[in-house]
Amino acid sequence: MTKLENEWQDFQKNQIEIKAKMSIIELSTQKIPDMAERVGELKNWKQIGLALFGTLIGGLITYLIKTPNL
């Protein structure tokens, strides 16, 4: 009977561990939409940065072309 009791206790311990892991996974999956939103915002900032960089380069090229005494 003790072997059966030991197996039952092991089963209960494993079940508790599984529940703990599932709660961690559940918390992680709840954070996915927030992280996706942050990645979207980062892409927007990247696009804004590239547009500003392109504008500065274009302005510099235009300045160099229009200024004859360099």
Image (cartoon, helix red, strand yellow):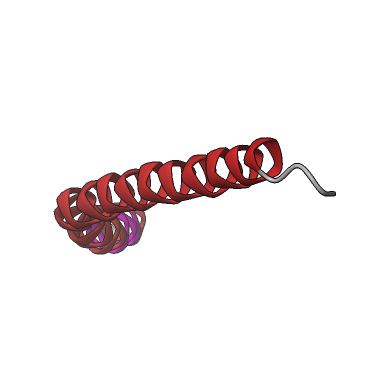
Give me the residue at 27% from left, 52% from top.
41
Residue sitting nearer the eye, 43 or 47:
47
Residue 28 inside the magenta-drawn segment: no
Residue sitting nearer the eye, 36 or 12:
36
Most common secondary structure along the magenta stretch: helix
Give me the residue at 82% from left, 48% from top.
69
Q: Which residue is the extreme one toward the right?
A: 70
Give me the residue at 30% from left, 63% from top.
13
- x then y, percent, for residue 3: 36, 55
| Segment colored magenta | 6-15
- x then y, percent, for residue 59: 54, 45
Residue sitting nearer the eye, 49 or 64:
64
- x then y, percent, for residue 47: 38, 41
Q: How many marks?
A: 0
Q: Is residue 68 left or right of residue 35?
A: right
Quarter of the image where one finds residue 27: bottom left
Give me the residue at 63% from left, 40% from top.
66
Q: Which residue is the extreme one toward the front?
A: 69
Q: Quadrant of the N terminus?
A: bottom left
- x then y, percent, for residue 44: 30, 46
